[in-house]
Image: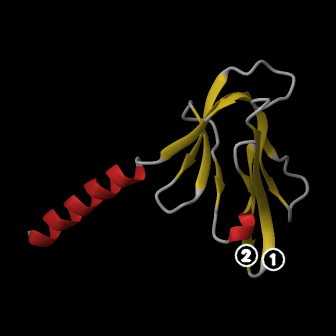
Amino acid sequence: MIKILSLTAALVMGAQLAQANEVVVTCRGSVQANMAHVESYTVSLTERGNVIVEGQYKDTPSIFINVDVAEVVKQNNDEGLHLESSKRRLGMVFSKQSVQINYKTGKGSARDFQTMESNIKPRTVFLDNCRR
C-alpha cells in the first residue's frame, strides 16, 4: 500500500515538473514561408536545460533540441538565438535540429530534418513577431 501511494505521489510530482517549462520566446508562425503566420509558437527551456519549440495546437509536431554540449549554442545574446543540435544512433548522425531567431527583425525558423533518409521532407516552422 505504501509503495502504491509513493508511486502515485512521484507520478503527480513528475507531471507537475514536466509542465514547468520556462518560456523564453513567443512567436507567430506557420509551416510554409508564404502562408500567414496564424499559429502561436513558444520556445521553452525544459527543466533539464534542453530547448523545445511547440505550437499552440495539440497536433502540431514539436521540435526538440538536446543541449548536451556547449557547441549546440551558436548565439544567445541581445541580437538573437541560434541553436544547432543532432541526434545520433550508433555514432552516426540520424537527424539535425536548429532554431534561429533574430530579435531585431522578429523573424526566425525552426527545423528538424533526417540525414539518413533523404526522401523525408524536413519539418520547418517559419517564425515571425518573435518576442522575448
| Element at label 1 | strand
Q: Where is residue 92 in the image (x, y as percent from the top left)?
A: 81, 76
| Element at label 2 | strand
Q: Residue 77 carries which label?
A: none
Q: Where is residue 118 in the image (x, y as percent from the top left)?
A: 91, 57
**Amino acid found under the numbered disc labelled 2:** Arg
Q: Distance between the residues labelled 2 and 1?
A: 5 Å
Q: Where is residue 86 in the image (x, y as percent from the top left)?
A: 75, 65
| Relative side of 3 to 54, left or right | left
Q: Which residue lies furthest to the right in this view?
A: 118
- The residue positioned 64% from the left and 54% from the top of the image is 64
Quarter of the image for the C terminus: give it. Answer: top right
Asked if the residue at tag 1 contacts the one at tag 2, i.e. Cβ–Cβ closer than 8 Å, the answer is yes
Q: Mark 1 points at which residue?
A: 92
Above or below residue 48? Residue 91 is below
Q: Mark 2 points at which residue?
A: 89
- The residue positioned 77% from the left and 81% from the top of the image is 91
- Is residue 60 shown to the viewer in this render? yes
**Amino acid found under the numbered disc labelled 1:** Met
Quarter of the image for the N terminus: give it. Answer: bottom left
Above or below residue 5? Residue 15 is above
Quarter of the figure with residue 28: top right
44 vs 38, nearest the viewer = 44
- Is residue 87 shown to the viewer in this render? no
| Relative side of 70 to 14, left or right | right
- The residue positioned 78% from the left and 62% from the top of the image is 95
